[in-house]
Amino acid sequence: MGKLKELIEQIAKALVDNPDAVQVNEIEGEQTSVIELKVAKEDLGKVIGKQGRTARAMRTILSAASTKLRKRAVLEIIE
C-alpha cells in the first residue's frame, strides 16, 4: 500500500518550494488508509491551492489510484 504514499509524496514535492520539508505518513485501518501530508508552513498555500482546488485534485487522483488497488484512501493535509 506504499504506492499511494509515494504518489502523494511525489505530487507534493513537485508543488512546493521546499521539497525536503515534505512528510507523508500512512495510517492503515481495516478498510481505509489515512494519508497525512505535512509541508513547510510557507508551502501550505501551494498544496491547498486557490479555494482548495489543488487539494481537491490531489484527493481525486488518490481516490482513483486507491480504487484501482481496491482500497479506500483519505488525504489529510496537516498544518
Image (cartoon, rainbow, N blue to C red):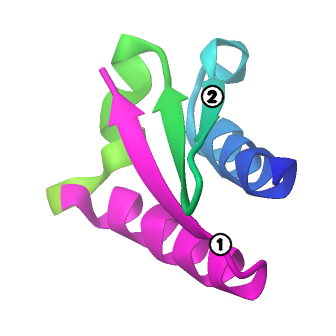
Membership of 21 in magenta stretch? no
Quadrant (top left/top right/bottom left/bottom right) for the N terminus: bottom right
Q: Quadrant of residue 69?
A: bottom right
Q: Nearer the viewer, mark 1 or mark 2?
A: 1
Quadrant (top left/top right/bottom left/bottom right) for the C terminus: top left
Look at the image and give the residue range highlighted in magenta. Answer: 52-79
Number of the label disc, if any, that sits on residue 71: 1
- Look at the magenta stretch and give its main secondary structure: helix
Give the mark nearest the N terminus, 1 or 2.
2
Residue 16 percent coordinates (x, y):
56, 33
Q: What residue is drawn where x is 64% and y is 30%? A: 24
Query: SS for tag 1?
Result: loop
Q: What residue is drawn where x is 36% and y is 14%? A: 41
Q: Amino acid at mark 1?
A: Lys
Q: Amino acid at mark 2?
A: Asn
Residue 75 percent coordinates (x, y):
45, 51
Instruction: Classify mark 1: residues with Cα within 10 Å, few (<14), some (14-19) or many (20+).
Output: some
Outermost residue to the front: 30
Q: Quadrant of residue 23?
A: top right
Residue 60 horizontal side relative to residue 7, left or right: left
Q: Quadrant of residue 66?
A: bottom right
